[in-house]
């Protein structure tokens, strides 16, 4: 037999070594199993995150194309009130500045009575979330439609050339009559 001729003390020592080795092998096997399970979960999580990121990118591209399709100046205000120019696709002839710093100085491009009106409505939007739509005249001459709305992430200001909007309505009316 395996332990023939060995004293009981030697046999106990050998059995102890065998038990320790077997225990270590079982523990290593259990650790490897746990590691493989964790690695599989990590890969699944990474795959889900990549899929979610791809879906969000696609949604962002769609949203950007919608925003860019409409000739407008769009300003998003962060919850702290800081403005960010999202898009400016208005013709320079309209008289709406393309730089955010100049755009936020309403009195520099709107008629004298229009600037304080817009500033008051924008302040009200910040405080109460009450939306507004105004038709205002620029110093360059054209009228613009200014819309302020609250959103989940803050609030925004949208400025559109009213002449362009009238053309859109006329085309829609023409299509409806046809």
Image (spheres, rainbow, N blue to C red):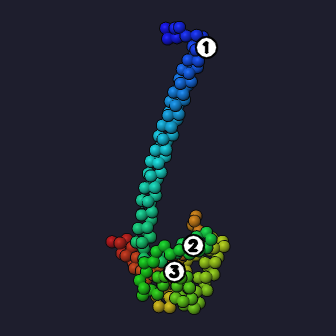
Q: On the image, numbered disc 3 is attached to which residue?
A: 100
Q: Please state, as top left, top right, bottom left or bottom right, where the C terminus lies in the image.
A: bottom left
Choose the circle earlier in sequence order: 1 or 2.
Answer: 1
* The one of 22 and 74 positioned closer to us in this rendering: 22
Q: Give the number of callouts.
A: 3
Pointer 1 with pointer 2, Cβ within 8 A: no
* The one of 162 and 153 positioned closer to us in this rendering: 153
Residue located at (61% from left, 79% from top): 121
Q: On the image, numbered disc 1 is attached to which residue?
A: 9
Q: On the image, numbered disc 2 is attached to which residue?
A: 77
- Percent x, y for residue 14? 55, 17
- Disc 1 secondary structure class: helix
Choose the circle earlier in sequence order: 2 or 3.
Answer: 2
- Disc 3 secondary structure class: helix
- Identity of the residue furthest to the left in this view: 178
Residue located at (51% from left, 80% from top): 100
Choose the circle earlier in sequence order: 3 or 1.
Answer: 1
Pointer 3 with pointer 1, Cβ within 8 A: no
- Percent x, y for residue 126? 63, 73
Q: Is residue 118 left or right of residue 164?
A: right
Q: Is residue 13 left or right of residue 73?
A: right
- Percent x, y for residue 76? 54, 72
What's the distance in space between the residues labelled 2 and 3, CA to CA?
Answer: 12 Å
Q: Is residue 175 above or below residue 57?
A: below
What's the distance in space between the residues labelled 3 and 1, CA to CA?
Answer: 89 Å
* The one of 96 and 49 positioned closer to us in this rendering: 49
Camera sees residue 148: no
Instruction: Give the quarter of the image for residue 148.
Output: bottom right
- Graded by Cα atoms within 10 Å as few (under 14), some (14 to 19) or many (20 or more), the crowding at tag 1 reads few
Residue located at (60% from left, 11% from top): 8
- Graded by Cα atoms within 10 Å as few (under 14), some (14 to 19) or many (20 or more), the crowding at tag 3 reads some
């Amino acid at each position: 037999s395996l332990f023939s001729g060995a004293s009981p003390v030697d046999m106990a020592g050998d059995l102890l070594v065998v038990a320790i080795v077997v225990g270590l092998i079982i523990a290593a096997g259990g650790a490897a199993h746990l590691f493989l399970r964790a690695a599989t979960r990590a890969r699944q999580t990474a795959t889900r995150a990549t899929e979610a990121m791809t879906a969000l990118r696609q949604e962002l591209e769609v949203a950007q194309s919608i925003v860019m399709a409409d000739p407008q100046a769009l300003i998003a205000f962060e919850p702290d009130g800081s403005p960010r120019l999202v898009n400016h696709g208005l013709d320079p002839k309209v008289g709406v500045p393309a730089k955010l710093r100049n755009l936020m100085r309403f009195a520099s491009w709107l008629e004298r009575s229009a600037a304080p009106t817009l500033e008051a409505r924008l302040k009200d939007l910040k405080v109460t979330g009450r939306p507004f739509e105004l038709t205002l005249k620029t110093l360059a001459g054209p009228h613009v439609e200014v819309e302020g709305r609250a959103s989940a992430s803050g609030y925004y200001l949208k400025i559109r050339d009213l002449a362009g909007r009238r053309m859109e309505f006329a085309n829609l009316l023409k299509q409806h009559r046809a």
